[in-house]
Image: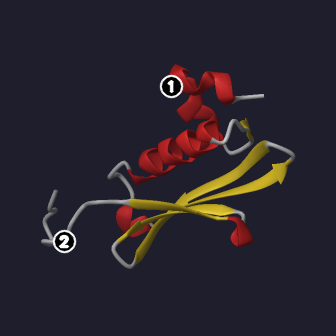
Amino acid sequence: MTDSDGESDDLTVNRHDELSRYEGRRGADLVTVINFRLRGAVHVVTHTETDPRWRGRGYADQTTRAMLEDIRAAEGKVEPVCPFTVDFIRSHPEYGDLSV
């Protein structure tokens, strides 16, 4: 997909354990960050933030979905402390089984 500035709208999500966060990037731009703490196999999600330039495009949703799928694949669990993550899981019951 291409947006109005002619750039690809693709988002790449990566986990960075050394920073305790997931990052959503659009090209070289850091768009969304989700911070977490590990408590055993439980990811305590503490904060989600999207750069103001990229808000309203669904990038936080995409990054959250990728994070939850990654945690599911690792057979982990989520303790959502971040209000955004709480609301996302509430709105997407297919992820309810990941919450502790």
**Residue that lies at the very extreme toward the front in this rendered image:** 74
Residue with the mark numbered 2: 7
| Occupied quadrant, residue 86 | top right
**Viewer-side residue, 81 vs 40:** 40
Residue drawn at x 65%, y 22% as measured from the top left: 97
Above or below, 55 against 29 in this view is above
**Viewer-side residue, 52 vs 71:** 71
Residue drawn at x 72%, y 55% as measured from the top left: 36
Q: CA distance from mark 1 to mark 2?
A: 30 Å
**Residue that lies at the very extreme toward the bottom in this rendered image:** 28
**Callout 2: few (<14), some (14-19), or many (20+) C-alpha neighbours within 10 Å?**
few
Of labels 1 and 2, earlier in sequence is: 2
Position of 55 compared to 8: left or right?
right
What label does residue 91 carry, if any?
1
**Residue that lies at the very extreme toward the right in this rendered image:** 40
- Which amino acid, mark 2? Glu
Count of numbered labels shown in the rendering: 2
Percent position of residue 29, x then y: 40, 76
Percent position of residue 15, x then y: 59, 61
Residue drawn at x 71%, y 29% as measured from the top left: 99
- Which amino acid, mark 1? Ser
